[in-house]
Amino acid sequence: MKSFTTHTGLVAIMDRANVDTDQIIPKQFLKRIERTGFGEFLFWDWAKLDDGSPNPAFELNRPEAQGASVLVARRNFGCGSSREHAPWALEDYGFRVIIAPSFADIFYNNCFKNSMLPIRLSEELVDKIFSQAAKRVDYRLTADLENCTLSDEHGFSTSFEVDSFRQHCLLNGLDDIGLTLEHEDKITAYEQAQGIGVS
Amino acid sequence: MKPRTLFQKIWDNHIVHSEEGRQTILYVDLQLVHEVTSAQAFEGLRLEGRTVRRPNRTIATADHNIPTTDRSLPIADEVSKKQIDTLRDNCKEFGIRHYDLDDPNQGIVHVIGPELGYTQPGMTIVCGDSHTSTHGAFGALAFGIGTSEVEHVLATQTLLQSLPKTLELRVDGQLSPGVTAKDLILYLIGQITTDGGTGYCIEYTGEAIRALSMENRMTVCNMSIEAGARSGMIAPDETTFEYLRGRQYVPEDFEAAVERWKKLPTDEGAEYDKSLKFAAAEIAPQVSWGTNPGLVASVDGKVPTPSDYSDPTDQKTVANALAYMGLKGGEPITDLKIDRVFIGSCTNGRIEDLRAAATVAKGHKVSDHVDAMVVPGSGQVKRQAEAEGLDLIFKEAGFEWREAGCSMCLAMNPDKLSPGERCASTSNRNFEGRQGKGGRTHLVSPAMAAAAAVAGHFVDIRDFV
Ligand code: SF4
């Protein structure tokens, strides 16, 4: 897995609550058996008009959002289906940081497995970012995972919370399976105690 | 010992390793696998040269992507076919029991696990699917995971987990006639909202829950994720044991297992992180009107307007939902005219659901402006329904009768809504485009869906004769 230490990037704002994974990556794209290449289908039903051309009204299609790598949205981002295709699509599109007042649990978890940093901030702070971004062109934020801070170049700075183990894994790009297998003897001991075997 | 909740007992029983500042390594008793979220996990194993640690703790089926029409014909969609073939090949390569398309026990993964007796009280169960919460109806800790985690479980038979909080939803008293488990869970989600359960494992308790059959308990637990909770559970009791007795994969010494399972329910005096109480008598049949499962109304109520909400984000959500659903707000629910009806899914595709719908449909005709379909949740459900003659009742009334699968619950296969079509659906999600781009989904119980099919619009099942 790729590591994540700090990231500075252009901010795209999405003024919507309860953005579900069916929107992030609609089901017609879940038939593929690869892990990559989902970026072009991100938010498909919102991003495209009926004839398949880009919908100019959609947030991420606006000129000022081009090249964005930090996404800011309202509460309960990523709810619904467990499909990891959602973080795959966001990552493939170019997002590295997602900020919202709250995330759905499975989505939140899936982000860390794909070298993306989801950041929970209060509704007030998210509001503040929305108004900052609305005021400026080329509004950028820097997320520093080591120090757990989020800041811009105009005096905004805040800290955020992240589980220390997840932080450690993401900073070092550690593979969960490898980590768990360091405890393989304990898994075997558990199975023996429970009478779990191959048959 | 300190009194513990059902959740705490199962969690404690499955700790392989825990240490300060780390996620717990939790043992997984059973993993269910389907075609859409597994291919990349198996590929990951191959790339790292890893194997499946416990193939006998893993079962697979194809359900999401498959046609529900004649199975003897080749699958027309090449990309779907490849995904289904890939699952078959992966199961063969890694030695996993696969309920393939031609298997009599094929079906929706959350329907076949319980009906084959794989799902048992006290287990930890995972699947790359958010509705894994269904299996919590048996007093199991069951939750959906992402594909990276599917790979983790295949390789290690464990999962890294942070301890969730516990939320008790207690429903006292009795449901009124005509009000079902589906109405109960839609009502609860409406009350606590779609993120009310985020970070929690829900335990449903109270008289109204205890009175539910296993099928109905599964309907309730299934939709826990729609309230934001990864898992929802109900303590095992005689209803649970009776359902499981005699099923194919239950423990050989069943009575000894029952004695163990009886120790699982939450102890007197155990504490939840949060408890909420509801009165069953206040629940009316529910119809969702918006684009998330928390946007519901009683069938005798009206579609709300944004000004009924105070929070600006809620107002915006409601305005967007109304626009998508083609509603102005203020319409009586029973005035909503429908084009399609879908009866099926892992929420309401079990035998009792089909019986409830057939009871309503019997002797009636589907309204001539409505297309209605019934999709059994599994091959077993289909055969049982046919043995009882339910298929004939549906066909005579003008419903289509299909093969088992997810079908129009998520419309990955050819079953889908056209833009603007309004559908009464017994599934669990009314997200934009869920049943087809531009399609408008209203979530209801099987009886309410059947009644709407006949009337051509929503009707209060309590008035339906
Ligand atoms: S029936 Fe619907 S919700 Fe259930 S597993 Fe299939 S697609 Fe998912």
Image: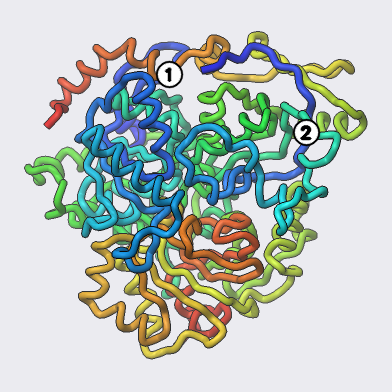
Label of residue A176 in the image: 1
Q: Quadrant of the C terminus of chain B?
A: bottom left
- Badge 2: residue crowd in 10 Å (few <14, some 14–19, many ≥20): many
Q: Name the residue that disc number 2 marks.
A: A12
Contact check, label 1 and label 2, Cβ < 8 Å? no
The picture places residue B185, in percent across and down from the top left corner, at 47, 57
The picture places residue A154, in percent across and down from the top left corner, at 89, 17
Ligand 1 under 8 Å from disc 1 Cβ: no
Mark 1 or 2, nearer chain start: 2
Which residue is farthest left? B253
Q: Distance between the residues labelled 1 and 2?
A: 30 Å
- Residue in the picture at 43% in, 70% down: B446
Taking the image as drawn, is residue B318 in sight? yes
Give the left or right position of residue B224, taking residue B378 as reference.
Answer: right
Q: What residue type is labelled 2?
A: Ala
**Element assignment for label 2:** strand
Give the left or right position of residue B16, taking residue A152 as reference.
Answer: left
The picture places residue B146, in percent across and down from the top left corner, at 46, 34
